[in-house]
Amino acid sequence: MRRLIAPLLMMGLVSFGKAAYADTEKLQTLLQRNNCLACHLIDKRKYGPKLNEVAAKYAGDASAVDVLAKKIKAGGTGVWGEDIMPPQPQVSDADARMIAEYILALN
């Protein structure tokens, strides 16, 4: 019985790791396609906050996806000090929502 459980457990962990990687890969694709990487990186500060910081700041906020998707499209200021998020009206509503969901999943 133990011989069967250990391989199944390992397969589950490997599958979980691939799923998490796939989400990060999809996020990277969206960030590149929508020019977000001009100011943001996942784990390093560029001009805007690290996306890991954004995920941590909004963790547990039920309205965070909507708030971030709107902020991506409309821009904003004051949340991260004097940093200014310029509006990105060219980003589709669907992409803005998916970017927000993936960012929040980083935490």
Image (cartoon, helix red, strand yellow):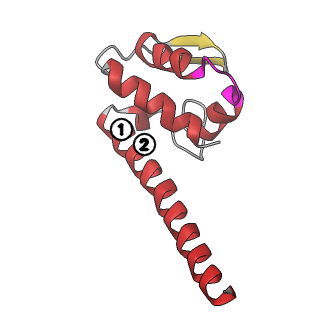
On residue 72, which mark appears? Answer: none
Q: Which residue is mark 1?
A: 30
User: Does the magenta stretch mainly form a helix, a strand or a loop?
Assistant: loop
Callout 1 amino acid: Leu
Distance between mark 2 and mark 1 Cα atoms:
5 Å
Locate the N terminus by quadrant. Answer: bottom right
Disc 2 and disc 1 in contact, CB within 8 angstroms: yes
Q: Is residue 85 visible?
A: no
The segment highlighted magenta reads 57-64
Element type at marker 1? helix
Give the image location of residue 50, x and y in percent.
60, 38
Task: Please say whether residue 59 is one of the residues in the magenta stretch.
Answer: yes
Give the image location of residue 84, x and y in percent.
55, 16
Report the front residue among 7 and 2.
2
Q: Quadrant of residue 34?
A: top left
Q: Hey, which residue is sitting farthest front in the picture?
A: 1
Q: Which residue is mark 2?
A: 27
Residue 2's place in the image compared with 58, above or below, is below
Residue 103's place in the image compared with 83, above or below, is below
Q: Is residue 58 visible?
A: yes
Residue 15's place in the image compared with 90, above or below, is below
Callout 2 amino acid: Leu
Dot 1 crowding, Cα within 10 Å, few <14, some 14–19, many 20+: some
Residue drawn 47% across and 62% down? 18
Residue drawn 33% across and 13% down? 89
Report the front residue among 2 and 65.
2
Give the image location of residue 91, x and y in percent.
32, 22
